[in-house]
Amino acid sequence: MSLSVSVTINGAPHAIELDDPRVTLLDLLRERLELTGAKKGCDRGQCGACTVLVGGRRVNSCLTLALSLDGSEVITIEGLASGDALHPVQAAFIEHDGFQCGFCTPGQIMSAVGLIAEGHAGDDPERIRELMSGNLCRCGAYKGITEAVLEVQRAQQTGNRKDAA
Amino acid sequence: MNRFDYIQPKSVNEAIAAASAPGSTYLAAGTNLLDLMKIGVSTPARIIDITRLPGLDEINWLPDGGVRIGALVRNSDLAYDVRFSRTFPSVAEALLSGASAQLRNAATVSGNLMQRTRCAYFQDLASACNRRKPGSGCDARGGENRLHAVLGWSEHCIATHPSDFCVPLVALDAVVEVEGPHGARDIALEALHALPGATPERETTLQPGELILAVRLPAQATVYAGHTRYLKLRERTSYAFGVVSAAAALEMSGGTIRTARIALGGIAAKPWRARAAEAMLENVKPTPEAFAKAAELALVDARPSGDNAFKIALARNIVVRTLTLAHDGTPKDMPALPASPFAATPGTSHAG
């Protein structure tokens, strides 16, 4: 059986031949493309460490078959920064101590980027906590994570108001 | 995970034809199926990936005011659809109380209906489970079973259906459109999931090869938009399956209930419609006594299947609470913590 998949990852097109249909998006990234930012925590969709954007939406890459993604655009943590300039969410995580050991951090950041794009949390910390509940942090850095997301949300809202004025 | 053949059909007919081979399974987002394959509970020989089938990802409003939701509409897209969440707010609330944002972005309408029980013994290959392996026994009986069924269970299986989405759908008379080798048919959602009896391995009434194309909500269900809620008790605030849950919907006329709809989740192998309680509430005043009586009726046949007698009392309480909040009126905005009984007012904090 010939199994091929074409995906754009962080802006770069990849045409990949797979020898096995069982490869998940997470395994494709980590084992075949050397993009090890997305982490394999539970591998069962429970921890969120593998979160990436597919078509602009945050999903668990461990529960996605690579083959079913033909034609998709994927953004991973490696694709966020512009050269040496950090993405605002990355900068906010550093500013607010949104991590300790760092294992969950790529997933947290990708989830936060997705949350902000979805636009359902506003600047309500309660809604941010609720909408970030798919990302576990065993160091318990939740307070800093919430503050980091909140700061980027507020900065965007201020920016939007300036744009409108 | 076992090795499987992977097929991506281009049409519904192609998909159904492909599914006629033994050992075939339809794959939508895979948020439940891939997980079960990784732990060896599901071992399909052939995966038929339906995610590219055309036309199944649309929300279509019907001329009479009802809605037809395509099988592949993602949970988050349905929950945040403005017209849908205004017209069927308790369905949107149930969706947003389920899983995590990442899973809701992927998981589909039909996948939610077809998800399997989260019974730990069903997931553990070393345990006896009649649902997974007919005739092997049920280690949940006499095991860790405080979260298991209190209605409709049998000595062969005490598992529950984990869906939130299905609970208000059943309350609102949702209909499932399926197509199979012998043509198309409609199934009332209430009749889709089977009680275990002596054959817990038969989880739904779908015939081999049948594929869900859509879920319809009838126009009649729109009369409840102003007075409907879904509440779900969890062991943590978010991203947890329900211990017990309830959907309630009231059609008010003056100060009197004209009609009521009630369904319970987390207590049986199917979403549980409480028709006797609904009938009792017709044409009565919405008093605490009436709601308590309705809750009694809803749970009248309940009995513990293990260390879970507390769920019966909890389920009664959640019915009363859901009816009370439904009567208060559907909130203008989706609560920050959807379906949480601890956050009746927007902005209530759970994490200090």
Image (spheres, coloured by chain):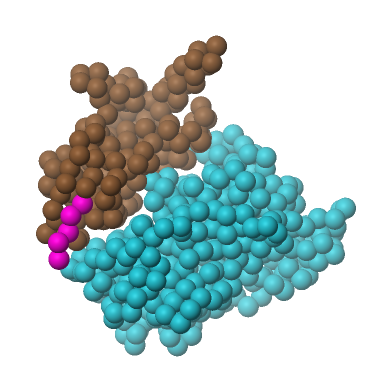
Q: Is residue A2 magenta?
A: yes
Q: Is residue B299 above or below residue B333?
A: below
How many numbered discs, if any? 0
Please identify the quadrant where the N terminus of chain B is shown. bottom left
Question: On the picture, is B87 further left or further right than A2?
Answer: right
Which percent across, then down, holds residue A118? 45, 36
Q: Viewer-proximal residue, B57 or B244?
A: B57
Q: Is residue B47 above or below residue A105?
A: below
State the hue of chain B: cyan
| Magenta part, dominant SS | strand
Q: Is residue B282 magenta?
A: no
Q: Viewer-proximal residue, B297 or A165?
A: A165
> What residue appears at the point 41 percent right and 23 percent down from the top-left corner?
A152
Q: Viewer-proximal residue, A40 or B224?
A: B224
State the hue of chain A: brown
Q: Is residue B282 above or below residue A157?
A: below
Q: Is residue A147 visible?
A: no
> What residue appears at the point 76 percent right and 71 percent down from the top-left corner?
B279
> What residue appears at the point 24 percent right and 34 percent down from the top-left corner?
A11
Magenta extent:
A1-5
Question: On the picture, is B198 further left or further right than B126?
Answer: right
Which percent across, then down, holds residue B259? 78, 63
